[in-house]
Image (cartoon, rainbow, N blue to C red):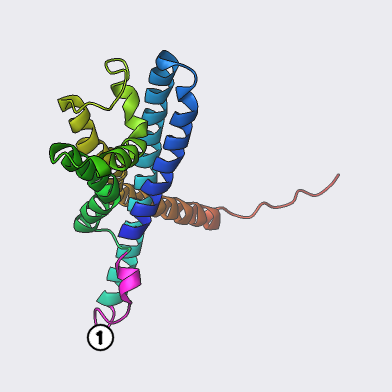
Amino acid sequence: MSIMEMWKSNALRTAVLVVLDMALISLGTLPWVVLGLLLLLIGMFLAYRQGTYFGHEACALLDNVRRVEANSDHPGEQFDKKVLSRTWSVGRGIAGVLAAALIPYLAGCVYLAAVMLDISAVQMPARLVALVLAMPFLPILASWFDSFVEIHPAIVTLLLVSPFVLPLSIFAGYMQGPRLWARSEKAMAEGRRRARAKSRVAKKRPPKVAKPEI
């Protein structure tokens, strides 16, 4: 998984959740809250599952790179930077989280700064962008707020924390990569041992002698 892949995955998932949440608003507050929270949980679960896929694939690529470099006279020269950028790395995962959260986090910061500095020309468009990007998380507060115009600590917290929720869900799955890769390698090794054992048993069995017909 590269940083760009994580960014694209998060952007697409956020866009889908925003569209679905906008459609749910017309159903009323209670359905929006219940279904919106359900959608958010599903989105987080799918993000986690995709993270496990990213992590497993990244570990497989890292193992392949290490094998090739171990048998090479010039380690580090066998692969280009694009390939190496997709190998498993904790630092790369963290960078992916920060990159994926950057735009919605900056949108929230710009809106809050415009309010605190009383820049009226910026407040309206900044609020619109920040709230649209935070739309999947607004059902969390919808039962307590009729609107999200006022600056309340809960709203400020939501704007500054929500950008990291889906990226961290991907990251949580991504961190399972080494464990999943080790488990799949163990399963493959056991499968090969079973196949060899069956082959040896088959060789030891004497061929069946056909009985003469009477």
Magenta region: 71-85
96 lies left or right of 60? left
Residue lying at the far bottom of the rendered structure: 73
Q: Nearer the viewer, residue 186 or 182?
A: 182
19 lies left or right of 61? right
Rendering coords of residue 81 (x, y %): 30, 74
The residue depicted at 42 percent of the width and 28 percent of the height is 39
The residue depicted at 23 percent of the width and 31 percent of the height is 158
| Residue 174 seen by the camera | yes
Q: Nearer the viewer, residue 49 or 212?
A: 49
The vertical placement of 121 against 151, above or below, is below
Q: Nearer the viewer, residue 11 or 128?
A: 128
Rendering coords of residue 50 (x, y %): 39, 45
- Amino acid type, label 1: Asp
Rendering coords of residue 116 (x, y %): 13, 37
Is 78 magenta? The answer is yes
The residue depicted at 19 percent of the width and 57 percent of the height is 91
Is 163 magenta? The answer is no
Reading the image, the residue beneath label 1 is 73
